[in-house]
Image (tube, rainbow, N blue to C red):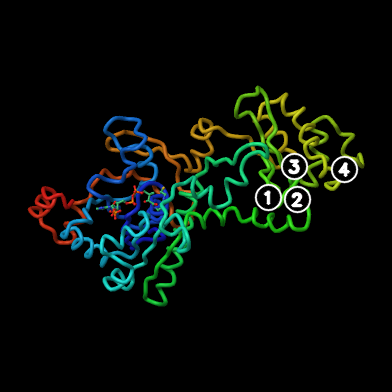
């Protein structure tokens, strides 16, 4: 038994934001039927590493789903879709603005077909000025407060490698869908769930709007920046939060030989001992957070003079032994090979019928009564017969639909 067992999701998503949401729903136990155009989700063919085989882009975002093809621009396709909607609990899509309406299925029409349907849409933007615009990951980062606050003061705005605009929005969509499913238990009605990528990124950049308002009352003392205008500046690797932190270099000096160290008030004494500067623990120039605040750059320099002589794993263990929070910068290679992530089910090997074994990132949601078993992504239209058969479409008609470009 899984948490979402019995929930049928009609998944019209493509690319990343939508598929990341429906993959989580599938891992929570929903029966996710991915409805694709007859050429399939474009990512099946993007960034291919092996010729003729679904890309990792696709396989890593579409596990545990079933796939059907359906041409939504054909009359028979629309009829079949109508039947699918009647049988589904949730419809999820992330097409460009207005695409589902243009297919002939407005929210009003969908409600008529199935009043219990939860209809979730991911778009780039909310219903305001930007509503008709398409969006991709970094556009959401640009317009949601992430790029302006990422990077160094003297450099350009930067995109982050974490896909907060796409997969970040997907997680927000899952939260909305689960709440709607829960509310349906009392109302017996579905509802519209709308999530915008700009909104999701802004939600994640919430603390930067905190700092924007703090600026009105003086400089942000927790930031490493020396001067402040009327906008929150990019602050490099400082979080700007309550506890100072920085990425300091380690041996042997490669691109990922860094460790991020946080100096809590209680951490200074053990750190000063570990770095061989025990005398600074009680030195009034260094002893308190207030004394250190104006010279955080010097403090991290002192720490780096020690870390640069050790590799990041040694530093990790030594600092943690003294209860000092820190985190080495783990490269993608280190992550994919990390034994503890394998043991925890966060890096999982999956068998794919055409590509053989591939690795994917498992579910970060771990429920004691609803364990996740990661299964392969489906081939394009792999479940046409199974699912259209359930709708009463005969084998002869299936063949005809294929010939006519309906499936
Ligand atoms: N049968 C027939 N036509 C189909 C179909 C199907 N099963 N599925 C999709 N289509 C059609 C749509 O009807 C649409 O046609 P129309 O514009 O003539 O009405 C067309 O495919 C294109 O859809 P669209 O989503 O606009 O694709 P795109 O490649 O031009 O844009 C995005 C891609 C990602 C920019 C856009 O989908 C978008 O802005 N999505 C919302 C934000 C988002 O999720 N972005 C991040 C993606 S990771």
Mark 2 Cα shell of 10 Å, populated few (<14), some (14-19), many (≥20): many
C-alpha gap between disc 2 and disc 3 = 9 Å
Mark 4 Cα shell of 10 Å, populated few (<14), some (14-19), many (≥20): some
C-alpha gap between disc 1 and disc 4 = 29 Å
Mark 3 Cα shell of 10 Å, populated few (<14), some (14-19), many (≥20): many
Q: Nearer the viewer, residue 167 or 326?
A: 167
Q: Quadrant of residue 322?
A: top right
> Residue tagged by mark 2?
220
Which circle marks residue 232 in the picture? 1
Q: In screen coordinates, is 190 left or right of 366?
A: left
Q: Earlier in the sequence, mark 4 or mark 2?
A: 2
Labelled pair 1, 4 in contact (Cβ < 8 Å): no
C-alpha gap between disc 1 and disc 2 = 9 Å
> Residue tagged by mark 4?
287
C-alpha gap between disc 4 and disc 3 = 19 Å
**SS class of the residue under badge 4?**
loop
Labelled pair 4, 3 in contact (Cβ < 8 Å): no
* Cβ at disc 1 under 8 Å from ligand 1: no
**SS class of the residue under badge 1?**
loop
């Amino acid at each position: 038994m899984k948490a979402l067992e019995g929930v049928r999701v009609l998944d019209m998503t493509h690319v990343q934001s939508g598929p990341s949401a429906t993959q989580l729903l599938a891992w929570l136990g929903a029966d996710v039927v991915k409805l694709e155009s007859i050429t399939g989700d474009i990512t099946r063919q993007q960034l291919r590493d092996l010729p003729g085989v679904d890309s990792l882009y696709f396989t890593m975002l579409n596990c545990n789903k079933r796939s059907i093809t359906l041409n939504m621009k054909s009359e028979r396709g629309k009829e079949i879709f109508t039947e699918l909607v009647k049988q589904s609990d949730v419809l999820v899509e992330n097409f460009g603005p207005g695409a589902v309406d243009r297919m002939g299925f407005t929210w009003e029409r969908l409600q008529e077909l199935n009043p219990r349907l939860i209809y979730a849409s991911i778009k780039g933007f909310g219903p305001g000025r930007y509503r008709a615009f398409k969006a991709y990951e970094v556009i959401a980062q640009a317009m949601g407060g992430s790029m302006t606050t990422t990077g160094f003061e003297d450099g350009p705005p930067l995109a982050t490698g974490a896909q907060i605009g796409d997969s970040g929005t997907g997680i927000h969509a899952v939260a909305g869908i689960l709440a709607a499913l829960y509310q349906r238990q009392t109302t017996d009605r579905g509802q519209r769930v709308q999530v915008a990528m700009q909104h999701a990124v802004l939600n994640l950049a919430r603390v930067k709007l905190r700092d924007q308002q703090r600026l009105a009352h003086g400089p942000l003392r927790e930031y490493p920046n020396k001067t402040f205008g009327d906008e929150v500046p990019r602050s490099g690797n400082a979080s700007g939060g309550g506890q100072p932190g920085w990425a300091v270099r380690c041996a042997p000096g490669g691109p990922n030989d860094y460790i991020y160290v946080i100096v809590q008030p209680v951490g200074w004494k053990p750190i000063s001992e570990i770095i061989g500067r025990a005398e600074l623990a009680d030195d009034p120039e260094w002893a308190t957070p207030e004394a250190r605040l104006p010279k955080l750059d010097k403090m991290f320099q002192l720490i780096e003079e020690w870390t640069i002589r050790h590799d990041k794993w040694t530093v990790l263990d030594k600092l943690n032994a003294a209860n000092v929070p820190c985190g080495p910068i783990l490269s993608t290679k280190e992550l994919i090979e990390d034994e503890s992530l394998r043991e925890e089910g966060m890096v999982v090997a999956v068998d794919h019928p055409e590509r053989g074994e591939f690795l994917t990132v498992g579910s970060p949601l771990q429920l004691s009564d609803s364990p996740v078993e990661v299964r392969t992504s489906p081939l394009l239209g792999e479940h046409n017969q199974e699912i259209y058969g359930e709708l009463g479409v005969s084998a002869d008609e299936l063949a005809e639909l294929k010939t006519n470009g309906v499936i």
